[in-house]
Image (cartoon, rainbow, N blue to C red):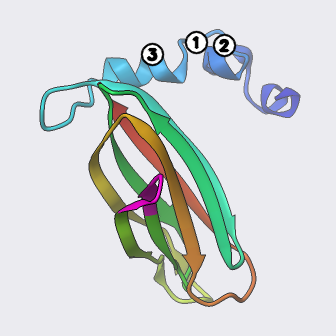
Amino acid sequence: MKRLEEIIGEDQLPSDYGGKLMSTSEVIQQMGKRDEGGNSVRRQIVELMAVKSKKQKQFELEADETVTLNVYTKSSSGANFTIKKEEETVVDGVSVKGKGTTEEPLPCGTQIAASIKGPGKFNVEANAESGKGVDHFLLIGDVFA
């Protein structure tokens, strides 16, 4: 956090990063992002997944919440994403890959799930397609209520 404050002044940082501006969740709410039912974003799930062979992340939804999940990457080899609610598979094997080549990767975003309903504990699993090296994936979920 201190390094961030050295690079960017506190008058330009959101309050949840030690600055004086409104928090990122307040900014999201002001942007007015809504789902098909007209519900606004309550919060976001943001996870960086460094995947060598397999990686898991968990999140929880309340009874009145739904989530839309997107994954962003430059990985040319990619990974398959599965989402489970306890033991039930909700989304199975969505492939996410960057565009371009290994030498010139280009970023890509893929929606892996829309309108997953709570309540429950969910597990997102990424399985690398190549297993060579570590690939990075940014999981972003917009939670609506």
Nearest the viewer among 10 and 118 is 118
| Residue 31 on image: x %, y % | 32, 24
| Residue 47 on image: x %, y % | 60, 48
Q: Which residue is mark 2?
A: 11
Q: Which residue is mark 3?
A: 26
Are circles 1 and 3 on residues that touch, CB within 8 Å? no
Q: Residue at x 56, y 56 (%)?
A: 138
Disc 1/disc 3 C-alpha distance (Å): 10 Å
Disc 2/disc 1 C-alpha distance (Å): 6 Å
- Label 1 element class: loop
Q: Is residue 47 magenta?
A: no
The N terminus appears in which quarter of the rendering?
A: top right
Q: Residue at x 22, y 31 (%)?
A: 34
Residue 35 lies left or right of residue 10; in this view the side is left
Q: Which residue is mark 1?
A: 21
The amino acid type of the residue labelled 2 equals Asp
The amino acid type of the residue labelled 3 equals Glu
Q: Residues within 10 Å of mark 1 (few under 14, many from 20)?
A: some
Q: Earlier in the sequence, mark 2 or mark 3?
A: 2
Q: Earlier in the sequence, mark 2 or mark 1?
A: 2
Give the residues drawn in magenta, as a range.
83-89
The amino acid type of the residue labelled 1 equals Leu
Nearer the camera: disc 1 or disc 3: 3
Q: Residue at x 58, y 12 (%)?
A: 21
Q: Residues within 10 Å of mark 2 (few under 14, many from 20)?
A: few
Nearest the viewer among 57 and 2 is 57
Placement of 79 over or under 42, stated as above or below: below
Placement of 49 over or under 37, stated as above or below: below
